[in-house]
Image (tube, rainbow, N blue to C red):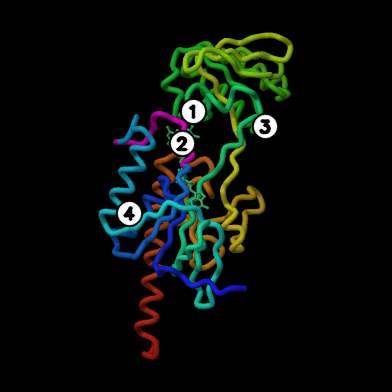
Amino acid sequence: MMTKIPNTQHDVIVIGAGAAGLSAALVLARARADVLVIDAGEPRNAPAAHMHGFVSRDGMPPAEFLATGRREVSSYGGTIESSTVATIDRREDGGFDVALAGAAVHSARALLIATGLKDDLPEIPGVRERWGSLVHHCPYCHGREVSDQLIGVIGGLAREMSLKQAGLLRRYSDRVDFITNGIDLTTVERHRLEAFGVRIVDGAVSRLAGEADVQVDITLTDGQTVRCDAVFIAPVPLPTDDLLRSLGCAADPTTGLIAVDAAGQTSQPGIWAAGNVVTPSAQVITAAGAGSASAIAINGWLLQRDLDTASAGRPTT
Ligand SMILES: Cc1cc2nc3c(=O)[nH]c(=O)nc-3n(C[C@H](O)[C@H](O)[C@H](O)COP(=O)(O)OP(=O)(O)OC[C@H]3O[C@@H](n4cnc5c(N)ncnc54)[C@H](O)[C@@H]3O)c2cc1C
């Protein structure tokens, strides 16, 4: 096997320039750490025109939020590279060689992995092309914008989330239809939703159609059509955690997610993770907060190692 020769050495490599990665990079760059951010350019909320719920940034287009973050990181000397990380190897000195999809290899003393997640959308024709415009998943992000409209909630594999959506969305509109689409409601669940004003439509969805960006017709296999202004689905979140797993980071046996402490430290020394990759429910603001907490923990960890190196050979008591 050919020995990889790192192109550059850094204190920290942050993988992923979404809210979590950029927030971490900003804190690290301001702390005068040498930080490189590598990003594949596919943030999760890219299909949405506006981002909501981030105080002081409410309604901002996601692309503008990320561009602002990149400018801030760069202004403090952080470097951002557009590329995909293919593999990471642990070095003998405890650091990491990070290989990009091209030929380049960068090395670092510590890593923050903030690679987000992929939403596994249901294979219903018409969903994918409306995702982020007329088809949503998060009432907190887009419920307010569809207030008093005709809302359809399509049941899915994430059963609990589908039921929660139906209830939550009833707060925004008095016309919420819950299309069960494979979810077998218990009698109690059915009564609770109906008593709350949610109309239950039993049946399986075959496709979504309708005038682009205006209206959605949900067609069921039995021929019924439910006309809506907005549709909510519950995709299955698939964390992009292959790099963490390849490095031996332990998963929580209950959730199956890579386990981290409150500051994002994984089971492997020198490796932190933040944002949707370890917390699928994180909003932009909480992903950013997690990135910031990780950055402070990483900087403290680097300091301890620098103090150890500087004082090597001196008395320890
Ligand atoms: C349609 C939609 C609308 C949403 N609207 C809102 C909203 O209004 N308000 C809100 O708070 N939340 C919203 N969210 C949730 C929001 O997207 C997430 O909270 C947020 O993106 C999490 O940030 P993150 O940094 O963890 O991940 P991301 O923003 O997804 O960033 C991860 C980055 O890592 C990169 N990456 C992945 N693998 C690699 C690799 N191997 N090498 C290099 N880079 C890699 C990706 O390309 C991506 O750029 C929405 C989600 C969706 C799907």
Measured Cα–Cα span from mark 2 to mark 3: 21 Å
Locate residue 40, reporting x and y percent.
47, 48
- Verify whether residue 143 appears in magenta: no
Residue at mark 3: 157
Write the residue at 50% across / 50% down: 115
Is the shortest distance between ligand 1 and the CB of mark 4 under 8 Å?
A: no
Locate residue 248, reporting x and y percent.
61, 63
- Residue range in magenta is 43-56
Is the shortest distance between ligand 1 and the CB of mark 1 under 8 Å?
A: yes
Query: Above or below — where is 104 with respect to 144?
Result: below
Locate residue 299, reporting x and y percent.
37, 65
For badge 4, the amino acid type reads: Leu
Q: Secondary structure at mark 3?
A: loop
For badge 3, the amino acid type reads: Leu
Front-lying residue, 69 or 271: 69
For badge 1, the amino acid type reads: Gly
Task: Count residues near mark 1 (Cα–Cα under 10 Å), then give few for <14, some for 14-19, many for 20+.
Answer: some
Q: Secondary structure at mark 4?
A: helix
